[in-house]
Amino acid sequence: MSTRKLLALYWAWLAALAATFFLRPQWHLGVWVAIGLTSVAAVLLGIRRNRPGARAPWFVLAAALFVFTAGDTSYNVLTTVLEQENPFPSVADALYLGMVPLLTGGLIGLARSGVAGRDRASLLDALTVTLGLGLLSWIFLIQPYVQTPGLTVPERLVSIAYPLGDILILLTVIRLLATARASTSVALLTLGAAGLLVADVAYGLSQLAGTWEVGGAVDAGWILFYAAWGAAALHPSMLRLTQPRVVRQSEIGPRRLALLATASMMAPGVLFVQALSGTVRDGVMISVLSAVLFGLVLSRLAGVATTHRQAVVRERAVREAGATLVSAADADQVRAAVLAALEQLMPAGTGHLAILDLDGAGAPEAAGRHARLAAQIVPVDDLPAPLAARLADFTAVLRCPLALANRPGGGLVGELLVAAPARALAALDRSVEVLAAQAALALERISLSAEVNRRISEEYFRTLVHNSTDVILILGDGARVRYASPSAARVLGHQTLTGADLLSLVDPEDRGRAGFMLDGVTDGELGTEYADWTIVRADGGRVEVEVSCRDLRADPSVGGLVVTLRDVTERRRLESELSHRALHDSLTGLANRVLFHDRTHRAVQRAQRNGTLAGVLFIDLDDFKVINDSLGHERGDELLVAVGQRLSEVLRQHDTAARLGGDEFAILVEDATHPADIEQVAERVLASLAEPVDVRGEMLSSQASVGVGISADARDAADLLRQADLALYLAKSEGKQQWRRYETTLHTALLKRLELRAALEQAVADEAFVLHFQPIVDLATGAGLGVEALVRWNDPQRGMVPPNDFISTAEDTGLIVPIGAWVLRTALETLAGWTRDAPQAWAEQYVSVNVSARQFRTPGFVEQVRDALADAGLPARCLLLEITESLLLRDDDQVWNDLATLRALGVRIAIDDFGTGYSSLSYLRQAPIDIVKIDRSFINGMEASPQQAALVDGIVRLAHTLGLEVVAEGIEQEAARDALLAMGCRLGQGFLFARPMPAADAARWVAPRQVAA
């Protein structure tokens, strides 16, 4: 009987049984047994008719159907024959629950049978969806059973076991859908499982409601389960479930993403609904489920990362194979390249055997066999007998045809067979497809090249010889020249070479090698040979030639050795020059980064073998950027050349000096016997660079900081270079113009500094700063006269970082310049906003902004201030710039000119933290400043120290004598305020009046007091 007729008869029989079940309820006991046994018989018949590759899973599913039927029959006997009213729990429940492990085991067997590879991502997705639905099962089925009063412990456990079993069945069904090929059998299994799950859920809800009765609509779901699963086994497509197949990592499409998102949002959705209702009943379960889902997401991400790493490795192997195939000259070289690439593609320790079959690939049988051009995994037994015999130790093979879509000859180039465990093959099929395509192209290229060469005629050869720039010689006995191409006179300078001994033209240093080469080719010991010779021209000059020699004595059109000489003198010179440029710095002539790293690697290896030491010194010129910016790059380059010369002079002959880029230099010290030897080099370097360099009559500073790393402290060359870099960072951070050696104890501190520097760089890019403002008040009235802008770093990990924790790092790295620019701009914009919102309160107010020496010396700072005032729409009198004493210590005309320009604009200047630095009276008299701010260290405790009070009084009197205003910082006690008023100090700021506060709070603090004043 045909399958179609059999399925039609099966469906008609089950339809009749279902109709009888619902129309004749009194017959339900026998009819239900008939339905269940029909499904079991259908599965067994399907196994016998279709003969699947793996029968065990189907037998397990048949057993599950039988146990389920037995459970239904037991329940019907208890209720119908023994007249028990809804017996629970009973032997029927034991059979129902016993069906669950059988059913899930069978589904898992089908999902794994014939699978080549493991789709871990699909399993995680299935778990995600199952857990989401499982939460609903917990809320509507499991928890009601747990909380239902009057149930015994066995009744409660059995009630909970039913939905848990359904969750397990749901997981295995989703897993099967993720791994199986789409087919009618898969659709029927899914339909039956859906009927089972819907019926079980409806049964559970009706049991809770007390409305369950036999013969209702719920039974239709179970009938569908029986019917669909029996039909799935009868349908021929059930064979595809156990045939070898590739399961690749699933890609998340819109539908799957929507499904996963819905499942993942069930827990927060339930929590949201329960929270709105006023009572969160399932908080523990929701939190546990959320944690598990989070773990699944992390596991999925880990799988994505692993897959990416494996793909990178395979891509590299295929790329290297492609490069090798480009230069392959024959099929054997192609075969060798392909097999070598497969060795790299195959996971380590995986047994495999690869065959590149190029025999008979164009036969009709072969062409039909490879109608599909994609790689596919097939059983070894499906191969032709000769190939199957060679691969008899394996069960699965990846077949990939070598085909070209537009090949002139048509057909296939060949076939690539890779036998290995199916799981390993599943991950390689796409890479092998690319490799096969490259091999096909290489074979096609070789074939076309051979065809072209075959068609070259003797006349064409003669034309090439006469017009070639290469010298072509035909040698007779004794290396005598029988023929020389016309280019010989131009290249070698000899008008005629006929009869000359070729070896007599070769430089004496190369003559022995040349004679050996000619003898080897003549005797047949060598094939076509290639070499480099130096030829002595007729005028005594030397020509470097690239030589090839081939024995064509058997060719009647030649009858001798063919020697080709190509003039490569200029090319060798250029290669030498390019090689030197590739490894040396073009400006200083020192080794570059590539050569330095290579020599460092070799030096460390040699030191480890010989028990000696290798040292690396990283050298960075201090304040080189200032020279570049102020004098120009041309002067800077001349300084770098001079520094390179000085470094070379302090080294031993076998040590290496290098320029790594910019103003960064490095020295490699080799074969040292003691760390002191390397440290002495650092001392010599500092001493050599301490003297200024004369550049066009101007003395420029070449002082530098040096970081030292020694191989005894490092694992390898990379570690040594890293340690030297960290030591250099330490040297610069501790004051520059010194050297520091890497020490293990400093590692943690250095890493923290580097982490802080990286985080601060990102903060500058993100403008992750906020301004707090501290009022400057009239000490007599308490009215605010202005505010000082104080920057804070709002870091996501560190929180609100005070300036003391990051300003020094910003100064060292130069980040203080963009930070200061942001502070200036933001402070003026904030004051402008306050003025617009409350013009009466803020009309006479000003904002004080701290400016670092480095920021002030930045070219264009005055323009930056002018632009910031213009953008904010504020007059210059609204801005007070606070500078440090150190800015005025150097005799820098540009600084004094900029200060005068700012004063002319109307911007006021204050000396911040007066008294803590040099505190020169001369610059107080000469500098264009308006205000002196007394440091808080003088104010604290002033009321208890007559000496300190006298010092503050002297500063105030001195400032007033010079016509300067005084602001006292750090006022915390009323006694200090009163003392300052008595001294004549009018302005101050400190915690007594207000702490630094956000902009909104500062506006609320200052405005009322200003209006009141």
Image (cartoon, rainbow, N blue to C red):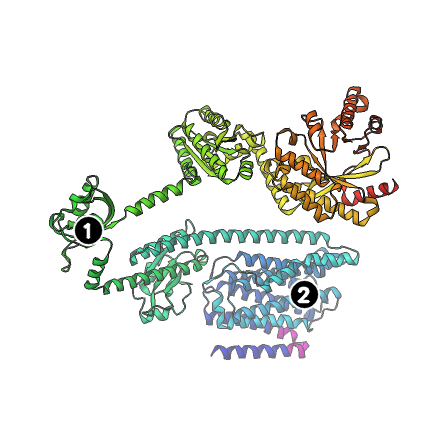
Going from N to C along the chain, the mark reached first, 1 or 2, is: 2
Q: Mark 1 and mark 2: span between their CA atoms?
A: 99 Å
Residue toward you, 785 or 746: 785
Residue at left offset 69%, top offset 29%: 926
Residue toward you, 175 or 359: 359
Does 914 lie within the magenta span? no
Q: Which residues are magenta?
A: 20-33
Badge nearest the viewer, 1 or 2: 1
Answer few, some or many: residues within 10 Å of disc 1's Cα (few below 14, many 20 plus, some between 14 and 19). some
**Where in the figure is residue 793, as x and y percent of width and height?**
68, 41
Answer few, some or many: residues within 10 Å of disc 2's Cα (few below 14, many 20 plus, some between 14 and 19). some
For residue 274, what is the image quadrant?
bottom right
Q: Is residue 793 above or below residue 4?
A: above
Q: Main secondary structure of the magenta part?
A: helix
Residue toward you, 725 or 281: 725
Residue at left offset 24%, top offset 56%: 468
**Where in the figure is residue 861, as x and y percent of width and height?**
64, 41
**Where in the figure is residue 398, as x and y percent of width and height?**
40, 61
For residue 615, what is the image quadrant?
top left
Does 29 lie within the magenta span? yes
For residue 509, what is the image quadrant?
top left
Q: Is disc 2 placed on a helix, strand or loop?
A: helix
Q: Is residue 653 above or below residue 49?
A: above
Residue 873 visible to the viewer: yes
475 lies left or right of 91: left
Give the residue type that dot 2 points to. Answer: Val
- Looking at the rendered image, the quarter that the C terminus falls into is top right
Q: Which residue is mark 1?
A: 489
Q: Is residue 512 above or below residue 26?
A: above
**Where in the figure is residue 108, as x and y percent of width and height?**
54, 60
Q: Which residue is mark 2?
A: 201
Give the residue type that dot 1 points to. Answer: Ala
